[in-house]
Image (cartoon, grey):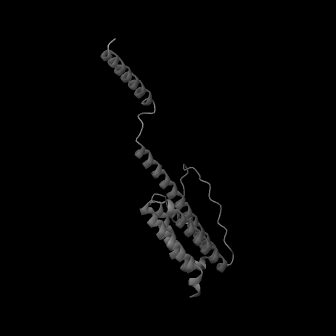
Amino acid sequence: MTTTGRRALLAAGAAAGATALVGCTSGAEGPRRPSAEREAERVARAEAALRARSVTVARGLLERYDAVLAAHPSLAPRLTPLRRSVAAHVKALGEGGTGPVEPAAASPKPSASARPTPSPAPVPVAADPATALKELAAAERTSSDGHADALLAAPPEYARLLASVAASGAVHAYLLTEGARA
């Protein structure tokens, strides 16, 4: 066999091997995705998880406001504007797709065909209004700290929103404690 014949044979063998490998990798799972696409999906999943955590924190705070308002209706003039702000935070943090943010009492009754969902455990509220306000202020600080901690993992636009919500929570905590003395 001549040198040219060997080269042709090797080239044909290499081409056949490459074809076989391509056939193996493009089987049931499809062609491999570029790493940039996989990275984009990873970032999107991380952001969705961050948003879900942020909305959960904000909803928990909203539930606390509702519980304090139910236990101490006399605090409504003071708490209603703050509660309204927290409800707006829930909506903004979840891009408006997180469901209603009104108190449970204002929610429509489920239809007979709707599947019942377990109700969350009631939020404990102190019998003394001053203590209830202090506990609500502590919840605001905890929520604010949680949003501030999430800034490190957030994409820039969402980080700005989290910073605003965290700052608002700090102001709410002040208004619930120190601001009452002024």
Q: Residue at image x 56%, y 63%?
A: 57
Image quadrant where one finds the C terminus: bottom right
Quadrant of residue 155 in the image? bottom left
Percent coordinates x, y for residue 92 in the rendering: 45, 64
Question: Dividing the image into 4 quarters, which one contains the N terminus?
Answer: top left
Residue 133, horizontal then vertical, whole percent: 62, 77
Q: What is the quadrant of residue 62 in the picture?
A: bottom right
Nearer to me, 73 or 8: 8
Residue 60 located left or right of residue 29: right
Percent coordinates x, y for residue 99 in the rendering: 49, 59
Residue 97 seen: yes
Q: Up-down: is 86 above or below 16?
A: below
Camera sees residue 84: no
Q: Nearer the viewer, residue 168 or 76?
A: 168
Residue for point 38% across, 25% down: 19
Residue beneath the point at 53% across and 53% down: 111
Residue in view at x 44 percent, y 62 percent: 158
Q: Specify the farthest residue to the right.
A: 127
Q: Position of residue 50 (x, y in %)?
A: 51, 57
Relative to 72, does residue 151 appear above or below in the rendering?
A: above
Vertical position of residue 153 compared to residue 19: above or below: below
